[in-house]
Image (cartoon, rainbow, N blue to C red):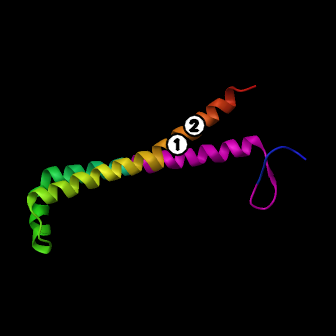
Amino acid sequence: MPEGKVGRKGSIMNADEMSNRLDAVAEILLRCFLFSLAILIVWFMSYVVGGDWIYSIHSKWFDLSKHEFALMNYYGMALLKLCAIVFFLLPYGSIKLMLRKKNFSP
């Protein structure tokens, strides 16, 4: 029996197919990371440019001080950045390192 992983329909997946699928997953993870960074930049710029206006809207709905509003934005941005790194960038890097190691091994 040939060496490889079993696919969805029970067929055997060879090393090239596995490498291609992992490369596709890595590219998706990279795009997700870049998209989350774009969201982070938009969030930061909207907070810097229109922070007072956004605060005035939210302070009507919720009983928030400016300090609490600033902390919520700061912690939210930090959480988004942490999640982007942990869930998208680290898996992307590990897949790329594994594929690179596999290509250099005899």
Give the residue number, with chain letter if any, for mark 2. 96
The three-letter amino acid code for the residue at tag 2 is Lys
How far is the residue under mark 2 from the one under mark 1?
6 Å
Q: Secondary structure at mark 2?
A: helix
Q: What residue do we see at 57% from left, 37% from top?
A: 96
Residue 31 lies in the magenta stretch = yes
Q: What residue do we see at 68% from left, 41% from top?
A: 19
Residue 92 bears which disc, if any?
Answer: 1
Q: Is the C terminus in the top left, top right, bottom left or bottom right quadrant?
A: top right
**Picture coordinates of residue 46 (x, y %)?**
19, 54
Quarter of the image for residue 61 reads: bottom left
Q: Is residue 30 above or below residue 73?
A: above
Local crowd size for mark 2, using a 10 Å CA cut-off: few (<14), some (14–19), many (≥20): some
**Picture coordinates of residue 93 (x, y %)?**
52, 38
Q: What residue do we see at 73% from left, 41% from top?
A: 16
Local crowd size for mark 1, using a 10 Å CA cut-off: few (<14), some (14–19), many (≥20): many
The magenta region covers: 7-34
- Residue 38: tell me if it is visible: yes
The three-letter amino acid code for the residue at tag 1 is Tyr
Q: What residue do we see at 47% from left, 48% from top?
A: 88
Residue 12 bears which disc, if any?
Answer: none
CB contact under 8 Å: marks 2 and 1: yes
Residue 70 lies in the magenta stretch = no
